[in-house]
């Protein structure tokens, strides 16, 4: 009966993951995966004869924490919460490995190898996710932390971990084995060292990669306890995380190695030509007249929209523009925001129609014919230097070509660079107008004028 339940749960995981690939079916995919996990959990508990009192207590406490987080965490804090979830998965796998043996126990390589991998990957995922959380929440500086000999130190730590693994397996494993204890400490250190040189602009890649790590750690834990559904689910998470990491890297035209080791966003990497020119401010009143006469408008959201919590106002403005006979769409860059799919989540929360969400490759060919491009808090993903300035660290990165629209209106609080620390010549283009101030207040002002009219 348990094996049958595991098969059904695995099928639900696969179907759920497939449906998560589309914004229109993502909610169904999430529900299918949740049902699959519930089925797997119940089947495991019934067969294993655990103490239901402790299990129920854990479910109540965990459910309360999850419910509180779902209600209280703002959309701007979602990347930090995802980072913590990744870290929780990593430390859980480490603890499963740690608890799967007792001092003096002799383990076969079939158990000791995945046990060591669960501890190694779980430890790296845990501390790496904590550092990512601290960077994203700005509790520590989001810029890369680089120092002389850093990569050499990383290589030494990694070599020491591999040596610990070999010695642990040769000595037949066991929790009392000092090589496992040393590996736990080194994995924690390596997790920190792996993430501190990564700048805030690369956090979407880091989040996807750490998610993959948590899945791989869970897969290793599944081999330890001989749990088929844990192996399947861990493999799916690990594989999908790696695929998503590849998509993020492609969206930035950079290799994974460059993301992990280049220190992108540090003072030394933020080169590029000096930006000269004078920004042209515009008022909300004048912006209204431009939009009122427009027949096509493309919104380009970024992290600034999340900070201002402007997604509902933006959705309302888009609806009013449509009522005015305007064609409206939302161009979503894969690395906009602080985690994969950040803008999609925000716009879905505001009930923006799925068919209005378009990718850069779909919107760029028509950008020159677009009357108005409205950039809301995005910066690096619309920076023309990525096309024109070979000395810029953004050079070669696919962007949304808003500078080619007939009029580009940028909503920002100031002219400061984006998270990558790279100056943006878009602000000084002839067809660009800067609507400075709080994005939500600016959009609400435009909404009010359309309603009055």
Image: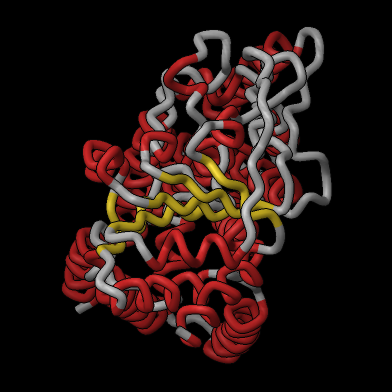
The vertical placement of 318 against 237, above or below, is: below
**Nearest the eye: 126 or 148:** 148
Q: Is residue 283 visible in this depiction of the protein? A: yes
Quadrant in the rendering for residue 326:
bottom left
Q: In this view, does 315 lie to the left or right of 422?
A: left
What is the x, y in percent for residue 411? 60, 54
What is the x, y in percent for residue 5? 22, 75
**Nearest the eye: 152 or 345:** 345
The vertical placement of 320 against 89, above or below, is: below
The vertical placement of 16 against 394, above or below, is: below
What is the x, y in percent for residue 214? 50, 49
Q: In this view, does 292 lie to the left or right of 358?
A: right
What is the x, y in percent for residue 141? 81, 39
Q: Which quadrant would the C terminus be assigned to in this image?
A: bottom left
Disc count in the image? Answer: 0
Q: Which quadrant would the N terminus be assigned to in this image?
A: bottom left
Instruction: Please report the residue visible at 60 percent of the width from the left and 32 percent of the height from the top.
Output: 428
The vertical placement of 419 against 52, above or below, is: above
């Amino acid at each position: 009966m348990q094996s049958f339940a595991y098969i059904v749960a695995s099928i639900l995981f696969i179907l759920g993951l497939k449906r998560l690939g589309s914004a229109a079916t993502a909610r169904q995919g999430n529900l299918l995966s949740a049902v699959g996990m519930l089925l797997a959990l119940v089947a495991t508990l019934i067969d294993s004869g655990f103490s239901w009192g402790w299990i129920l207590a854990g479910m109540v406490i965990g459910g309360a924490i999850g419910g509180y987080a779902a209600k209280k965490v703002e959309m701007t804090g979602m990347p930090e919460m995802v980072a913590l979830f990744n870290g929780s998965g990593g430390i859980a796998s480490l603890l499963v490995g740690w608890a799967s043996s007792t001092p003096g126990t002799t383990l076969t390589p079939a158990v000791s190898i995945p046990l060591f991998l669960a501890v190694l990957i779980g430890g790296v995922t845990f501390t790496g996710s904590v550092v990512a959380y601290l960077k994203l929440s700005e509790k520590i500086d989001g810029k890369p932390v680089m120092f002389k000999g850093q990569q050499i130190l990383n290589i030494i730590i990694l070599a020491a971990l591999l040596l610990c693994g070999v010695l642990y397996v040769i000595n037949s494993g066991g929790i009392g084995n000092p090589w496992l204890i040393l590996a736990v400490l080194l994995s924690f250190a390596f997790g920190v060292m792996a993430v501190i040189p990564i700048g805030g602009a690369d956090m979407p890649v880091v989040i996807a990669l750490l998610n993959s790590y948590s899945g791989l750690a869970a897969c290793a834990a599944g081999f330890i306890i001989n749990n088929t559904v844990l192996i399947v689910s861990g493999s799916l998470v690990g594989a999908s995380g790696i695929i998503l990491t590849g998509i993020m890297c492609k969206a930035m035209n950079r290799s994974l190695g460059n993301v992990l080791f280049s220190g992108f966003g540090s003072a030394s990497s933020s080169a590029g030509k000096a930006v000269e020119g004078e920004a042209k401010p515009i008022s909300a009143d004048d912006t209204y007249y431009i939009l009122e006469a427009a027949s096509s408008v493309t919104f380009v959201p970024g992290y600034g929209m999340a900070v201002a919590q402007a997604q509902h106002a933006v959705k309302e403005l888009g609806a009013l523009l449509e009522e005015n006979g305007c064609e409206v769409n939302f161009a979503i860059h894969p690395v906009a925001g602080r985690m994969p799919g950040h803008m999609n989540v925000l716009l879905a929360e505001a009930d923006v129609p799925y068919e209005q969400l378009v990718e850069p490759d779909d919107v760029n060919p028509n950008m020159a014919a677009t009357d108005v491009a409205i950039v809301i808090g995005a910066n690096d993903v619309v920076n023309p230097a990525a096309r024109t300035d070979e000395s810029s660290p953004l050079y070669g990165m696919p962007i949304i070509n808003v500078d080619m629209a007939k009029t580009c209106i940028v909503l920002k609080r100031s002219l400061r660079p984006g998270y990558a620390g790279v100056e943006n010549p878009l602000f000084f283009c002839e067809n660009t107008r800067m609507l400075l101030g709080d994005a939500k207040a600016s959009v609400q002002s435009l909404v009010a004028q359309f309603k009055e009219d």
